[in-house]
Amino acid sequence: MGFLQGFLPLALPIGAWYRMETTDSGIFAWLPLVIIFGMFPFVGRWMANDLNNFEGDVIFSLGEDPYYSSLQVVVVPLQLALIFWGVGVFVNGSLGWILSMGVVLSTVGITVGHELVHHKSRFEQACGGILLASVQWKLQNRTCARTSSVCCDPIRCLLDPNGSQCLSANSPRNN
């Protein structure tokens, strides 16, 4: 159930918007930034190191777990819905909204999208590509850090599912 915490950043702009609407104060547009750059580091420092992080083969086996994979795929429609909702907020919004939405959407899109492009399923790789594209992240000509059999570039993953054009961690970059 701890994986559900990954959805919390997506709720930050909605909660901030609700507080702004109920109080008529534009200061709440900055709330996601305060939480992400203020509270999260403080709480992380206070809680010390997480000694329960997964290592080695456990990380790779998580990609095979249907529950874990489905949670990551569910992020795609949530991210896209938040983008479209955010456009409406930007029309009447402020710099705080633009920065808050940018940080939240890029954090979620890059993190989850990167994990999905490492999965074996073409559907999950496509979902990862959509998330990365939603934040305009480009991975072309980058080497993979974890494995040589997985393509880091979502477009190449879709066009070349066998990974024959993908770069390995030890290969020179192809231009």
Image (tube, rainbow, N blue to C red):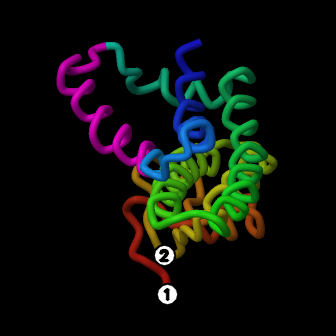
* Circle 2: residue type: Asn
Q: Residues within 10 Å of mark 1 (few under 14, many from 20)?
A: few
Q: How many marks?
A: 2
Where is residue 8 drawn, in percent x and y?
55, 31
Residue at the disc numbered 2: 141
- Of the numbered discs 2 and 1, the one sitting upstream in the chain is 2
Q: Nearer the viewer, residue 174 or 93?
A: 93
* Circle 1: residue type: Asn
Asked if the stretch drawn in magenta spans residue 42, the answer is: yes
Q: Nearer the viewer, residue 14 or 145?
A: 14
Q: Secondary structure at mark 1?
A: loop
Q: Which residues are magenta?
A: 30-51
Residue at image point 27% right, 39% down: 38
Q: Are marks 2 and 1 in contact (CB under 8 Å)?
A: yes
Q: Is residue 52 above or below residue 6?
A: above
Residue at image point 54% right, 71% down: 138
Q: Quadrant of residue 159?
A: bottom right
Q: Residues within 10 Å of mark 2 (few under 14, many from 20)?
A: some
Q: Nearer the viewer, residue 125 or 150?
A: 125
Q: Quadrant of the N terminus?
A: top right
Q: Is residue 116 above or below residue 70?
A: below
Q: Secondary structure at mark 2?
A: loop
Q: Is residue 149 above or below residue 90?
A: above
Label the magenta part by its dominant secondary structure: helix
Residue at the disc numbered 1: 175
What's the CA distance linking mark 2 and mark 1?
A: 7 Å
Outermost bottom residue? 175
Where is residue 17 drawn, in percent x and y?
60, 44
Where is residue 104 drawn, in percent x and y?
51, 49
Residue at image point 69% right, 57% down: 83
Asked if the stretch drawn in magenta spans residue 40, the answer is: yes
Residue at image point 74% right, 39% down: 73
